[in-house]
Amino acid sequence: MSSAPLTSADVARLASLARIELTPQELEQFAPQLDVILESVTSVAELAGADVEPTSHALPLTNVFRADEVRPSFTAAQALAGAPAAEDNRFSVPRILDEEA
């Protein structure tokens, strides 16, 4: 199944969604590269038949859980002692996004 190749406008839309600024030259450069990636993913998806279970890892993984036990720990004052800034018993860090919380 072949679809239309990605355009610079498609890449610009994806970059906008990912909040990445790209120059017009980068948009032109990345469009064919992303198109190759999408074609590769499509070809793999076409090969996987109904009898192939979706997996995230080649080998099965199991989590090792431990009991949730209360243990001695730092007090809030001890944890915040070396912090450059603290507010309301929490670390205070500069805002990195121009969004309201």
Image (spheres, rainbow, N blue to C red):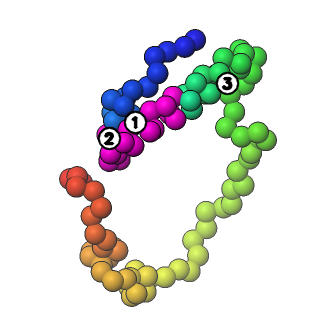
Q: Residue at x 79, y 41 (%)?
A: 59
Callout 1: helix, strand or loop?
helix
Q: Is residue 76 left or right of residue 94?
A: right
* Alpha carbon distance from label 2 to label 1: 6 Å
* Alpha carbon distance from label 3 to label 1: 26 Å
Q: Residue at x 52, y 35 (%)?
A: 33
Q: Give the residue pinned by disc 1.
A: 28
Tell me which corner region of the image, top left, top right, bottom left or bottom right, holds residue 43: top right
Q: Is residue 51 left or right of residue 12?
A: right
Q: Give the residue pinned by disc 3.
A: 44
Secondary structure character of the magenta stretch overall: helix
Callout 2: helix, strand or loop?
helix
Residue 73: mark in rendering: none
Callout 3: helix, strand or loop?
helix
Q: Earlier in the sequence, mark 3 or mark 2?
A: 2
Rendering coords of residue 61 (x, y %): 74, 45
Question: Which region is colored magenta?
Answer: 15-35
Q: Earlier in the sequence, mark 3 or mark 1?
A: 1
Magenta highlight on residue 85? no
> In the image, what residue type sits under mark 3?
Val
**Where, quadrant-wise, is the N terminus in this rendering?**
top right
Tell me which corner region of the image, top left, top right, bottom left or bottom right, holds residue 92: bottom left
Labels 3 & 1 near each other (Cβ < 8 A): no
Magenta highlight on residue 29? yes
Q: Residue at x 71, y 14 (%)?
A: 50
**Where, quadrant-wise, is the C terminus in this rendering?**
bottom left
The residue closer to the viewer here, 38 or 55, is: 38
Q: Give the residue pinned by disc 2.
A: 24
